[in-house]
């Protein structure tokens, strides 16, 4: 069977539309994931009951498949509240919660990597625990966790393909639609894989640039 380059070129506009939604979905989800993960990471290091709630959240989310989490949000929750959840909202909610669990562990590790002496010094200067965390610990921690956060963005970008199961027309779903119309899976999936590679490669280079710029100069 001859490889049809014309099909690849003809499919690109549709696939790029799906890629745009994939990037948008991933960016929004990672944004909320960082917010959730920051609170979860700080809670993991606290001494109150929130420590155990954060640990349970992180362990449950990391210990269950993203596909199952998607089914719970899109099919399970509507059954409880007797109201459907739009596919986009369900995808953002699922990916944000999933990302938050991984970011929580990244943030926890970043905070623990900061010299405890800085916390003691801040306390001696009269800073509260909140002020110390906000102005001293977190800014330094975030500089150190940029590489793993970048890896989390790339991982979530690829994992976002799972939301095609709820008929959200991101990149993978667009590919499935084209295949259903043309019956040419090899060309289409090769184009989808190439677009994913371009996105992940570009993001990894961008993260490397950001990391270099945020590193303290000697």
Image (cartoon, helix red, strand yellow):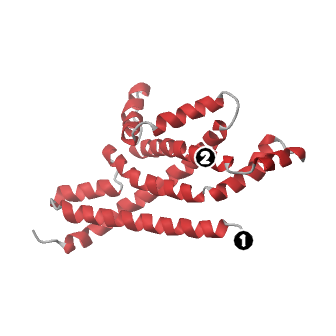
The quadrant holding residue 23 is bottom left
Relative to 68, say whether 6 is above or below: below
The quadrant holding residue 175 is bottom left
CA gap between label 2 and label 1 equals: 28 Å
Q: Is residue 126 visible?
A: no
Q: Does dot 2 land on a helix, a strand or a loop? A: helix
Report whether 92 appears left or right of 196. right
Relative to 147, say whether 99 is above or below: above
Q: Are circles 2 and 1 on residues that touch, CB within 8 Å?
A: no
Question: In percent of the image, x 18 and y 58: which residue is there?
Answer: 181
Report whether 164 appears left or right of 109. left
Q: Is residue 132 visible?
A: yes
Horizontal and vertical percent position of residue 190: 26, 65
Horizontal and vertical percent position of residue 180: 19, 55
Disc nearer the start of the sequence (2/1): 2
Q: Does dot 1 land on a helix, a strand or a loop? A: loop
Q: Which residue is mark 1?
A: 217
Relative to 144, say whether 107 is above or below: above
Question: In percent of the image, x 65 and y 37: which residue is there?
Answer: 43
Question: In percent of the image, x 42 and y 45: which residue is there?
Answer: 91
């Amino acid at each position: 069977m001859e490889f049809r380059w014309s099909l690849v070129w003809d499919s690109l506009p549709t696939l790029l539309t799906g890629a745009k939604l994939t990037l948008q979905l991933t960016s929004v989800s990672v944004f909320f994931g960082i917010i959730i993960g920051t609170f979860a990471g700080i809670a993991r290091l606290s001494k109150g009951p929130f420590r155990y709630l954060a640990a349970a959240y992180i362990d449950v989310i990391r210990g269950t498949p993203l596909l199952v989490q998607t089914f719970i949000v899109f099919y399970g929750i509507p059954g409880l509240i007797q109201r459907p959840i739009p596919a986009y909202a369900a995808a953002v909610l699922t990916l944000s919660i999933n990302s938050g669990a991984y970011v929580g562990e990244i943030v926890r590790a970043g905070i623990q990597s900061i010299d405890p002496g800085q916390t003691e010094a801040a306390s001696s200067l009269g800073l509260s625990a909140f002020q110390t965390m906000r102005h001293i610990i977190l800014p330094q921690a975030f500089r150190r966790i940029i590489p793993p956060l970048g890896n989390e963005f790339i991982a979530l970008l690829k994992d976002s393909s799972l939301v095609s199961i709820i008929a959200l027309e991101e990149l993978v779903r667009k590919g499935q639609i084209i295949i259903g119309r043309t019956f040419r899976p090899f060309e289409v999936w090769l184009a989808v894989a190439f677009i994913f590679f371009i996105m992940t490669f570009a993001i990894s280079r961008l993260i490397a640039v950001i990391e270099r710029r945020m590193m303290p100069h000697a």
